[in-house]
Structures are given as structure tokens and as C-alpha cells.
Image (cartoon, rainbow, N blue to C red):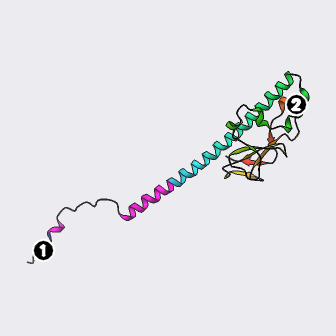
Amino acid sequence: MRKTVVPSSCFAPRQRQRGLSLFEFAVAVAIIGVLAGVLLERFRYYQEMAEKARMQQTLDTLNAGLRFHAAGLLVTGKTEQINAMDKQNPFAWLDMPARAGYCGLWLAAAKAGCWYYDPAAHAVVYVPIHRRHLSAAGMALRFGWPDGIHSESPMSVSLRPLENFNWAV
């Protein structure tokens, strides 16, 4: 009869491996990277949505300022001045234009995220920060009164885009 010798280490309890293997670590890093990429994309999307909402809110504020200014001229009997309102800077009608993001007169080198007034075109100009979902002809969005402002119906007038754009957010 032959005796088989089995080393004692075969029956000894195995010690548990501590930590991650290199493969497990690489998988964890890849998952975290994908999640970070998705989060960053969502963050950018919400930033652009917030910018679009702020732009629309500023346009609404300018339109309200236009109507209040026109109403003041109507009440005081200065209806002839209403026809000239489309040649004026609408930010001048606001109490705090800087709060609306107004940065001054339109220049060739404009800062993103600011509103400007272009006296040559009698237009309000906005230079967007985020343009990922924006399709526009130029680098700036221009708003104005294509039909002018008339004393017969000043309350129905509002700033409208002078060039087509689509901000799909």
C-alpha cells in the first residue's frame, strides 16, 4: 500500500485577498467615468436651458418697459414721441439695466452673456454663452421692431427677432 503525502497547506484555510484586483479597479474607474460624462452633459444642458430662460425673461422685461414708457407718453399727451421710441435704447427705460445683463453699446468684440444696443440698426443684441442647441445666422441674436412703433397701437408692440434662430432646449 502506497501512502500519499498531501502537503498541509492544501487543507489550511485560504487567506482572503484584500483590496481590488487591477481588473476590478479598471471596471470601477470606467463606470465612474461614464457616469461623470452623463452628469456633465446634463449639467451643460441645464445651463443652456437657464440661459435661454434668462434671455426670454429679459425680453419680457424690455417689452414691459416699452409698454410702461408708451403708457406714460399716452397719459401725458405726448403721442408724437411714441413713434420715435423704436429709435431709442430700450434699456434706458429700465430702472436698473445692469441687472438685466446690459453691457452697453454694441461693439465688434462683445462679451458673451451680455445684452447690447446697436444704435446703427436700432436693435437689441444678445450674445449667448452656450450655443450647443442654438442655430442662428450669426454669433449674436438681434431683436427689434421690424414694423416700428406707432402711436395708434403702442401696447401691442413687442421686441421680435430680426433674424431667424432656433434654440432647441
Above or below 31: residue 72? above
Magenta stretch encompasses residue 15: yes
Residue labelled with disc 1: 5
In the displayed structure image, the side of residue 7 where residue 31 appears, left or right: right
Q: Which residues are magenta?
A: 8-35
**Label 1 neighbour load within 10 Å: few <14, some 14-19, many 20+:** few
* Element marked by disc 2: helix
Frontmost residue, 169 versus 99? 99
Q: Give the image location of residue 28, x and y in percent.
A: 42, 58
The residue lying furthest to the bottom in this view is: 2
* Residue in the picture at 84% in, 39% down: 145
Quarter holding the N terminus is bottom left
Frontmost residue, 81 versus 153? 81
Label disc, if present, on residue 68 of the rendered structure = none
* Residue in the picture at 34% in, 60% down: 20
Label disc, if present, on residue 82 of the rendered structure = 2
* Three-letter code for the amino acid on which mark 1 is drawn: Val
Magenta stretch encompasses residue 94: no
* Three-letter code for the amino acid on which mark 2 is drawn: Ile
The mark closer to the camera, 2 or 1, is: 2
